[in-house]
């Protein structure tokens, strides 16, 4: 019943990649516009952890007193995420290039993305969430 043709999985995977890139691009542009807000207001950072476009965990980094590590299941294996007060990082990932890991701890609102694992760590400001979305 379902339409099947060679490469369906391949196309589907790339469609998801494309959507992820577009989403990240949109959020990055939004983030750039909001950077002055982050710096001027000193508002709490809320971190949304996305896997494959779905928020799997939300953390209020302003209330994160101690450094904490945990794993999320990326599309290509587990990804280790670190959180601490007002900062987050991807500490380990199965991706070949390790760009996300090399970003280290981010505390200025830049998104941390592992395209290979379809994992994105996106900072939002407490007071602005409703306005942005
Ligand atoms: Zn990565």
Image (spheres, grey):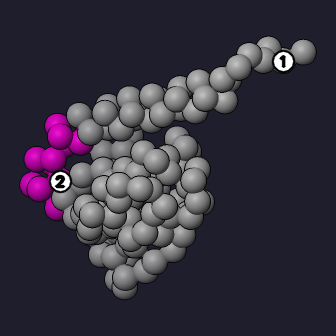
Q: Residue furthest bottom?
A: 66
In the rendered structure, does residue 38 fall within the stretch colored magenta?
yes
Left or right of 66? Residue 109 is: left
In the rendered structure, does residue 58 fall within the stretch colored magenta?
no
Q: Residue furthest right?
A: 1
Q: Which mark is residue 107?
A: none
- Main SS category, magenta section: helix
Horizontal and vertical percent for residue 47?
Answer: 39, 58
Residue of label 2: 38
Observer able to see residue 128: yes
Which residue lies at the image location 19% right of the left edge and 58% below the top edge? 108
Is the CB of the residue bearing disc 2 within 8 angstroms of ligand 1? no
Which residue lies at the image location 79% right of the left edge and 14% below the top edge? 3
- Circle 1 packing at 10 Å, graded few (<14), some (14-19), many (20+), is few
Find the magenta span and give its range: 30-42
Q: Nearer the viewer, residue 45 or 18?
A: 18
Classify mark 1: helix, strand or loop.
Answer: loop
Kindly report the distance in space between the C-alpha atoms of the residues bearing marks 1 and 2.
Answer: 48 Å
Position above or below: 54 against 56? above
- Circle 2 packing at 10 Å, graded few (<14), some (14-19), many (20+), is some
Position above or below: 95 against 83? above
Where the N terminus falls, by quadrant?
top right
Residue of label 1: 2
Q: Are marks 1 and 2 in contact (CB under 8 Å)?
A: no
Classify mark 2: helix, strand or loop.
Answer: helix
Horizontal and vertical percent for residue 123?
Answer: 33, 53
Which residue lies at the image location 46% right of the left edge and 48% below the top edge? 116
């Amino acid at each position: 019943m379902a339409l099947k043709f060679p490469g369906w999985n391949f196309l589907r995977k790339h469609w998801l990649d494309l959507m992820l890139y577009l989403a990240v691009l949109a959020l990055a542009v939004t983030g750039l516009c909001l950077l002055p807000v982050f710096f001027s207001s000193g508002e709490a950072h809320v971190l949304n952890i996305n896997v494959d476009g779905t928020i799997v965990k939300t953390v209020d980094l302003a209330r994160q007193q101690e450094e904490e590590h945990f794993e999320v299941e990326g599309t290509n294996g587990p990804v280790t995420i670190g959180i601490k007060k007002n900062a987050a990082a991807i500490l380990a990932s199965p991706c070949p290039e390790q760009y996300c890991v090399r970003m280290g701890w981010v505390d200025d609102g830049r998104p941390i993305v592992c395209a290979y694992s379809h994992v994105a760590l996106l900072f939002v400001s407490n007071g602005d969430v409703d306005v942005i979305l």
